[in-house]
Amino acid sequence: MELILDTAEVSEVAEIAAWGVLSGVTTNPTLIRRSGGDFIDTVCQIADLCSGPISAEVTATDVEGMLEQAHELKRILPKNVIIKVPCNPEGLEVCRSLSNDGIGVNVTLVFSASQALLAAKAGAMYVSPFVGRIDDTGEDGMQLIREIMGIWTHYPQLETKVLAASIRSTEHVIECMKVGTHACTMPTKIFRELITHSLTDIGIEKFLADWSAVEAEGRSHSS
Ligand code: G3P
């Protein structure tokens, strides 16, 4: 499963990229706003730190405006940047057009299996169902991922990857792994939690204490 970072904080991308496990980065207007940075400069810096696909979202709402923004972004941003569009009729039209031009598209704000399938048929590279925001409504967001992955198994010719988004916990990530979700984008906090275990920390402390004792006894050199 591709592990993708959902952030517009350049320092966080540098931190996780250093682990050697980062498959890409997703940004959105909210994350850009929160970061306080310039959109183009931020995406350029991120694209420099991570060779995987970096999602940059268009903000126009009409087809012409979205296509104009998308082509402009592709012109000025590094090659590994892909275009994020919303999952609505205009987004589908833009997705088909960009896909025909060989431009990668991430169709975002997916909340149903029918939206996911339509985005795939429009040539999306990724479809992004929002798990946490469905949980927020009192329903089970993971059920949508299970449903979509189940549908995908019936159509092996589908090349579109399912990218679980709006991830709020490590449990979400593990549940995504269990059903073979292609990719998962998560905040830095969740990434850090995935690598952390109290028994690992306790184990390291114990090994270090024992090694100090070995050194104190003068037994740390072979000759
Ligand atoms: O990738 C989409 C993500 O940024 C949305 O997450 O937590 O705002 O629902 P959230």
Image (cartoon, grey):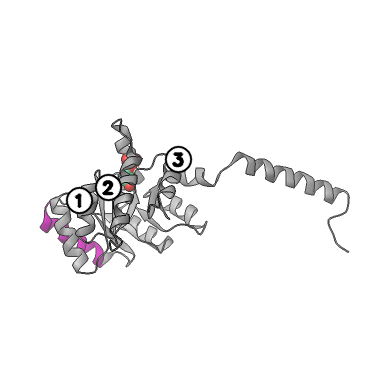
The N terminus lies in which quarter of the figure?
A: bottom left
**Quarter holding residue 2:** bottom left
Mark 1 or 3, nearer chain start: 1
**Crowd class of label 2 (few under 14; some 14 to 19; many from 20; radius 10 Å):** some
Residue marked by disc 1: 59
Q: Which mark is residue 29?
A: 2
Q: Nearer the viewer, residue 67 or 37?
A: 67
Q: Is mark 1 within 8 Å of ligand 1?
A: no
> Residue 105: x percent and y percent?
25, 59
Location of residue 77 with respect to 220 vertically, above or below: below
The C terminus lies in which quarter of the figure?
A: bottom right
Mark 3 or 2, nearer chain start: 2
Amino acid type, callout 3 = Glu
Mark 2 or 1, nearer chain start: 2
Residue 57 lies left or right of residue 94; in this view the side is right
Q: Residue at x 17, y 55 (%)?
A: 92
Amino acid type, callout 1 = Thr
Q: Residue at x 43, y 39 (%)?
A: 169
Residue marked by disc 3: 171
Pointers 3 and 2 in contact (C-beta within 8 Å):
no
Q: Given this view, does label 3 or label 2 mark the residue nearer the observer?
A: 3
Pointers 2 and 1 in contact (C-beta within 8 Å):
yes
**Crowd class of label 1 (few under 14; some 14 to 19; many from 20; radius 10 Å):** some
> Residue 191: x percent and y percent?
47, 47
Q: Nearer the viewer, residue 109 or 33?
A: 109
> Residue 205: x percent and y percent?
70, 43
Instruction: Give the extent of the magenta segment.
Output: 62-75
